[in-house]
Image (cartoon, rainbow, N blue to C red):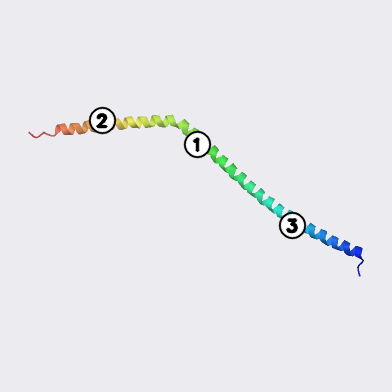
Amino acid sequence: MIPNNLQNLNETLKKTEQELNKEIQELQAKNTKEQETQKEISELKKAIAELQRQIEEKKTKLREDERQAPILHNEIRKLEQEQQKHHLELTRIHTSIQNSVPKPR
């Protein structure tokens, strides 16, 4: 038979081992959660970097568009003037045709 001291010591060691195993499991669960959180943080940082890249791209395009705007406005104005000239010529031709057709008496 095991002496009482050794039996008590053995029981204490078993309880300590159980407590340590439980603590190990809790730490492993916490570590897993932290790894998941770090992965999520990493993914969010990548998404933020991509959005920042897109923002810079849009800003660059906007600056280019702003530089092009006066040129485009001039081209539009010239095209509108040309359109107006053609419209006036069309009106002149139409009027000329109407004037050349004899009017019934």
Q: Nearer the viewer, residue 72 or 15?
A: 15
- Packing grade of label 3 (10 A; few <14, some 14-19, many >=20) is few
Task: Name the residue that disc number 1 marks.
Answer: 61
**Which of pointers 3 and 2 lies earlier in the amino acid sequence?**
3
- 3D distance between C-alphas at marks 1 and 2: 38 Å
- Identify the image quadrant of residue 93: top left
Task: Name the residue that disc number 3 marks.
Answer: 25
For the point 74% across and 57% down, which residue is it?
A: 25
Up-down: is 23 above or below 50?
A: below
Q: Residue 60's x, y, as percent?
A: 52, 35
- Identify the image quadrant of residue 102: top left
Q: Residue 21's x, y, as percent?
A: 78, 58
- Packing grade of label 1 (10 A; few <14, some 14-19, many >=20) is few
Q: Amino acid at mark 1?
A: Lys
Q: Nearer the viewer, mark 3 or mark 2?
A: 3
Q: Nearer the viewer, mark 1 or mark 3?
A: 3
Which residue is farthest bottom?
1
Task: Name the residue that disc number 2 marks.
Answer: 88
Q: Are marks 1 and 2 in contact (CB under 8 Å)?
A: no
The N terminus - image quarter: bottom right
> In the shown orientation, is residue 46 left or right of residue 3?
left
**Which of pointers 1 and 3 lies earlier in the amino acid sequence?**
3
- 3D distance between C-alphas at marks 3 and 2: 89 Å
Q: Nearer the viewer, residue 90 or 60?
A: 60
- Packing grade of label 2 (10 A; few <14, some 14-19, many >=20) is few
Q: Residue 47's x, y, as percent?
A: 59, 45
> In the shown orientation, is residue 26 left or right of residue 65?
right
